[in-house]
Amino acid sequence: MSTKYRFSENDIPHFVTLTLIEWIDLFSRERYKEIIIDNLKYCIENKGLIIYAYVIMPNHIHVIIKSVEGQELSKIIRDFKRYTAKILYTTLKSDKRESRRRWLLRIMEEEGQKSSSNKRIKVWRHENHPVALDTNKMLDDRLNYIHNNPVRSGICFRAEDYKYSSSCQYCGEIGLLPISFIE
C-alpha cells in the first residue's frame, strides 16, 4: 500500500502513530501496555531508537522518535510492530483473565486473513503516518499533543499523572522509559 507518509531522514525526530487494527482497545489493560514498554526499552537499548516523547493510549501509541546514526527508523518500527504483534497475540491467546479474549483473537485472525503481508494474524494497522518534525513549532505542537492526549480522552485530569506517558518526565519526575529531552 502506497502512502504519502514516509520516514525521511533518520537523524531528525519524527512524530509516529502506531494504531491497533479496528481501533481495538487492547491497551486498556495494563499487562498489554507493559509489553509495549518492555519492547520499547529493548529497541532503545539494542536497536538505536531514541524516544523524545510517548503516550500509550487504549488503541494507539504516539511517539516522537529518531534513530542513532547508521540505523533506519523505518526498520526499527517494522521490527517493533512485527515482534510485539506476536507477543501480544500469544499473550492474549493464553490470558484466561481477559474477558474479551475470543472477540479480540477473532478480529486479529480475521484481519490477518485479509492482509497481503501476513495471512495468520494482524495486530497493527499498516500505516504509521510518520511526520518529520523539522521546526521547533512542529516539535512543540506534537509534544503537547502527545502529553495532553490522555487528558482530552478523559483518562486523567493532568497529563503528568498518566503512567504510560513521558509527560511526568518533562515535569522532572521518573518515567517508565528512558527518554531524550527536546530542548
Image: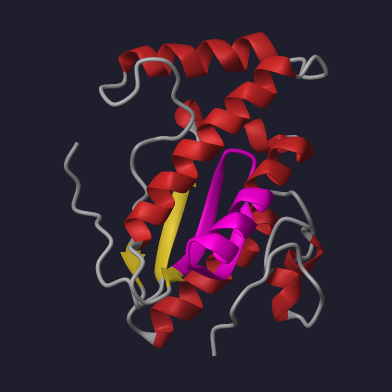
Residue 144: x and y in percent read: 57, 72
Instruction: Report the residue at 31% width, 21% height from top.
Output: 115
Q: Quadrant of the N terminus?
A: top left
Q: Nearer the viewer, residue 153 or 50?
A: 50
The residue most toward the bottom is 183
Instruction: Report the residue at 36% width, 12% height from top.
Output: 113
Q: Quadrant of the C terminus?
A: bottom right
For the rendered model, the colour scheme is: secondary structure
- Side of 156 where 110 appears, left or right: left
**In which image quadrant can residue 105 be found?**
top right
Q: Nearer the viewer, residue 76 or 29?
A: 76
Work out whether 49 lies above or below 121: below
Work out whether 60 lies above or below 50: above
- Side of 21 where 96 appears, left or right: right
**In which image quadrant can residue 44 be found?**
bottom right
Residue 135: x and y in percent read: 35, 84
Residue 32: x and y in percent read: 70, 37
Q: Is residue 182 magenta?
A: no
Q: Is residue 40 magenta?
A: yes
Q: Does the rendering let one see residue 167?
A: yes
Residue 156: x and y in percent read: 78, 55
Work out whether 155 lies above or below 114: below
**In which image quadrant can residue 84 be found?**
top right
Instruction: Report the residue at 72% width, 55% height from top.
Output: 164
- Side of 6 where 40 appears, left or right: right
Span of residues in magenta: 37-65
Instruction: Report the residue at 78% width, 83% height from top.
Output: 172
Q: Does the rendering let one see residue 100?
A: no
